[in-house]
Image (spheres, rainbow, N blue to C red):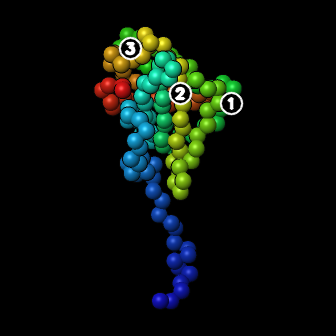
């Protein structure tokens, strides 16, 4: 086998975000919504008797926010519900050896809000960051 400079100059094949997301078998939450380049996993959980929403965004979205946090809006048929992030610092982490990121965000929730989210059909969910808005169409019929 001979050495060739042509192999060094060939562009490396890159895998796109949709292919990366399709290969991920994430077991840490319920796949709830998606848009063209991101997927969101979302679950209602309880800690010390208080409900909260645990979300993870996987895809090309990346952010680093300090002191302001973000909001999550559930859009229903006739109204919407806005929740604030539990932590004011939000940061994305790059998935090793890929161009994709994951962002974990928890949101404060009351018992009444948890019942509403679980019982009413959600048309869209929207994350609002400092200068970005990220919308997802729900694919799950029920939140766990």
Q: In terms of secondary structure, where does tag 1 sit?
A: loop
How many angstroms separate mark 1 from mark 2 (CA)?
15 Å
**Residue occupying image coordinates x 51% and y 72%:** 10
In this picture, is 22 found above or below 29?
A: below
Q: Position of residue 67 (x, y in %)?
A: 69, 26
1 vs 3, front mark: 3
x, y percent for residue 89: 65, 30
Circle 1 packing at 10 Å, graded few (<14), some (14-19), many (20+), is few
Question: Residue 125: in sight, yes or no?
Answer: no
Q: Position of residue 71 (x, y in %)?
A: 55, 22
Disc 3 target residue? 115
Circles 1 and 2 in contact, beta carbons < 8 Å = no
Picture disc at residue 122: none
Left or right side of 9 for 122: left
Q: Which callout, 2 or 3, points at the residue further toward the start of the chain?
A: 2
Judging by the rendered image, the residue that carries numbered circle 2 is 106
| Residue drawn at (53%, 27%) of the image | 106
- Please report whichever mark, 1 or 2, sits nearer to the chain's N-terminal start: 1
For residue 66, the mark is: 1
What SS does tag 3 mark?
helix
Judging depth in this view, the residue of 16 and 106 nearest the camera is: 106
Picture residue at 48% right of the left edge, 35% below the top: 56
Mark 3 nearby-residue class (10 Å; few <14, some 14–19, many ≥20): few
Mark nearer the viewer, 1 or 2: 2
State left or right for residue 5 relative to residue 49: right
């Amino acid at each position: 086998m001979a050495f060739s400079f042509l192999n060094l100059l060939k562009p490396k094949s890159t895998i796109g975000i949709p292919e990366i997301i399709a290969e991920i078998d994430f077991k840490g939450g319920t796949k709830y919504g998606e848009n063209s380049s991101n997927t969101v996993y979302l679950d209602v959980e309880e800690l010390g008797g208080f409900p909260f929403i645990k979300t993870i965004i996987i895809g090309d979205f990346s952010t680093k926010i300090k002191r302001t946090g973000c909001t999550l809006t559930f859009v229903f048929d006739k109204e919407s519900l806005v929740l604030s992030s539990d932590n004011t610092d939000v940061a994305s982490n790059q998935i090793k050896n890929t161009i994709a990121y994951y962002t974990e965000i928890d949101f404060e929730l009351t018992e009444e809000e948890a019942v509403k989210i679980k019982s009413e059909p959600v048309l869209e969910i929207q994350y609002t960051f400092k200068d970005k808005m990220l919308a997802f169409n729900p694919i799950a019929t029920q939140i766990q």
